[in-house]
Image: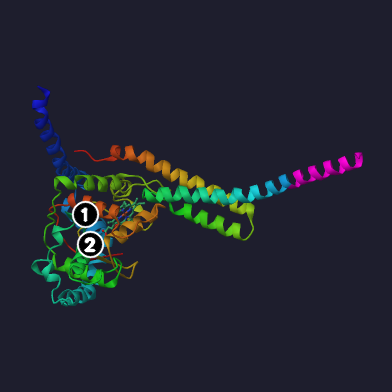
Amino acid sequence: MKKVMLTILLGLSYTVLADSASKIDSASKIDSASIIDRAEKLNAEARARHNAWVPTQRFIDQANSALSSGDEEGAKAAADKAVFLAEASLKQADVEQKTWKQRQLVK
Amino acid sequence: MFVRFLPVLFMILSSASMADVEADREAFRAFYAKRFSSIPVEAHVDGVYALDEAKRAQWLEMEEFPPYEFSVDDGEALYDEPFTDGSGYGDCFADGGAVKHLYPRFEGGEVVTMEVAVNQCRVQHGMESLAYDSEEMMQLTSYIAYASRDQLIDIKVPEDALPAYERGKQFYYSRRGQLNFSCSHCHMQIVGSQLRAEVLSASYGHVTHWPTYRLKWQEVGSLHRRFAECNGQVGAEALPLQSQPYRELEYFLTAIARGLLLNGPASRK
């Protein structure tokens, strides 16, 4: 009886462990893909506001090709840069909404 | 009591915004007249060649055999070719196409540039519209620019066009791209100074000479193509030719250039 319990317990903990291990594994995959996804959404927003930056798309492309060649770390690094640039371009659009007026020539 | 004054207040407010275009024009003229006090402000229609003697000499040499000449000739032939319904461009544009000084216009709630007007004319008469970067479009607009030479820019900004004018102005003064530059930073603040091998020209007069043959392009290209290139230089994504923001930018730059001489097509490096 004891042996049976032990086996069940071990079996259970094994599946739990294995399960969480595979979760960690797919989490890191979802992670880089979702950073790319986020970068793409932000860049689309910047584009809709006519304020996208050229290098943002370049880093998105770089992240995508790293991901498809299995380079998870490379994909993340490039996607992070793309997110950073896309956020900065949106920030610029926000700030300029007001500050352009200060540059206006007045007679 | 207050209600009685409302119409008056409204009149003051709206006439103030009407006057803005003229005030902007005067401010631009005054700015460049002061910055380059040794040349007449109208001379900026020649762009950088108004500012740099050596470049001007090279340019005058290039203009002796104008590289846009074929484009004008081919454009004239296209202009005279009847549409399939028997009509032609002459049914849309007066004076043999000498109409560039009246464009962009504000019609149907939008800015209609010369290129857009050419396509509107075609579609009205059952023809397909032309791609904005097509050779045919460049030839037609080269011919129209040539026929319109020596006219003075004479566009009006009616009351209902003021929001479009204002958006164009905002585009001009807004920082863009990773380098965080606005048009005004290069063509106003540091105008006349050297940027790599180039000297920065004044914005006043930037619209008078399009389309233009550029050595760099090895062909005739449009004003919006130049906008796209200037956007790209600061790491900003270029917008499509004849997109609404570019048309409104052109509208702003042309409105403040009212009274300037048309001198297109031209050649540039």
Residue at (82, 45) in percent of width and height = A11
Q: Point out the residue furthest to the front here.
A: A1
Which type of secondary structure does the marked residue at label 2 adopt? helix
Quick check: A67 above or below A46?
below
Q: Identify residue for label 2.
A: B116
Q: Quadrant of the N terminus of chain B?
A: top left
Quick check: B65 above or below A2?
below
Q: Inspect the image, locate mark 2, and give the three-letter code of the amino acid beneath it.
A: Val
Horizontal side of B160 relative to B48 (left or right) equals left
Q: Main secondary structure of the magenta part?
A: helix
Taking depth in this image into account, of B164 and A54 the one nearest to the observer is: B164
Q: Position of residue A24 (x, y in %)?
A: 68, 46
Which type of secondary structure does the marked residue at label 1 adopt? strand
Horizontal side of A20 relative to B89 (left or right) equals right
Q: Identify residue for label 1.
A: B111
Residue at (18, 77) in percent of width and height = B84
Q: Position of residue B233 (x, y in %)?
A: 39, 55
Taking depth in this image into account, of B43 and A77 the one nearest to the observer is: A77
Horizontal side of A6 relative to B174 (left or right) equals right
Q: Inspect the image, locate mark 1, and give the three-letter code of the amino acid beneath it.
A: Val
Check residue B126 for magenta coloring: no
Residue at (14, 73) in percent of width and height = B88
Q: Are marks 1 and 2 in contact (CB under 8 Å)?
A: yes
Check residue A17 for magenta coloring: yes
Chain of residue at mark 2:
B
Q: Position of residue B36 (x, y in %)?
A: 22, 48
